[in-house]
Amino acid sequence: MATGWNDDGQCDVLGWRNVIAVAAGWRRTLGLLDDGTVRAAGRGSEGQCDVAPWSDVIGVSCGDWHSVALRADGTALAVGVNRRRQCAVEGWHDLAAVAAGYMHTLGLRRDGRVLATGARTTGACDVNNWENIVQLDAGSYHSVAVTAHGTALAAGDNSHGQCGVTRWEGIVAVAAGSTHTLGLRVDGTVLSTGNNADGQCTTNAWTGVQIGR
């Protein structure tokens, strides 16, 4: 199911069946089916919905203008706008996860290192020294990750404090928005940092939060 702004048909998912994962981007939605194929709805005029040829996919992520997938063999696929080389994932291998931001893409390798491609001006791709990473996400202009020790790392634009995660501990998952970051702690509470103009960081009362399965 989907709800919200639907000017480009990004909520037209009622006919989708056997969906095991979804990803929502700017003006579009991706659905990963249990047979490893991917469906797309919404704006695709820049090629970001050209996912029909994809197969053996086990994970999907939506950037603003591009779509990225993780294949079962540990490689990545990408379609859409590539002006900043955010779709330049050919040659990536041994991946465990992918994440798409506004103009950059991240790939988490099985050895805990992180690959990045795309716009370099914001610093969101400055992840070469990250190690022991177990989960990551890409915001509009920043990147965040969880280490095997339960700490968090961030790189990129910090104009709203969205990279202020250095003191976080006991983290099991992170999520990056446009200008804010959330961190799920092992006790089910949620930390937040960044722009709170619309209450997006008001998570103090959240308890019992778990990672979706």
Image (spheres, helix red, strand yellow):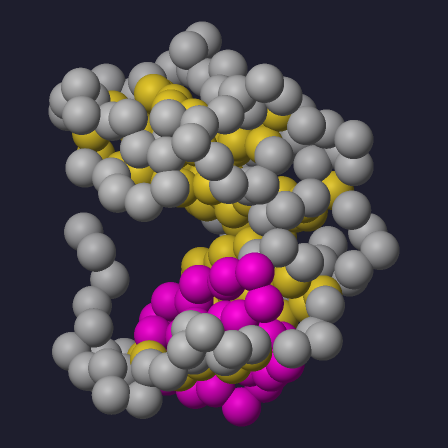
Question: Which one is nearer the viewer's eye here, 159 or 132?
Answer: 159
User: How many numbered circles does the render carry?
Assistant: 0
Q: Residue at x 56, y 60 (%)?
A: 178
Q: Residue furthest front?
A: 7
Residue 177 magenta-highlighted = yes
* Residue displayed at 82% across by 51% down: 120
- Residue 60: x and y in percent read 41, 35
Q: Is residue 184 left or right of residue 83?
A: left
The location of residue 140, given as percent across then percent down, is 62, 55
Q: Residue 20 location, x and y as percent? A: 21, 34
Vertical comparison of 2 with 170: above or below: above
94 within the magenta span: no
Residue 44 visible here = yes
The quadrant in which residue 71 appears is top left
Give the percent coordinates (x, y) of residue 26.
Answer: 51, 41
Q: Quadrant of residue 104?
A: top right
Point out the stretch of residues depicted in magenta: 161-184
Q: Nearer the viewer, residue 54 or 195?
A: 195
Above or below residue 111? Residue 198 is below
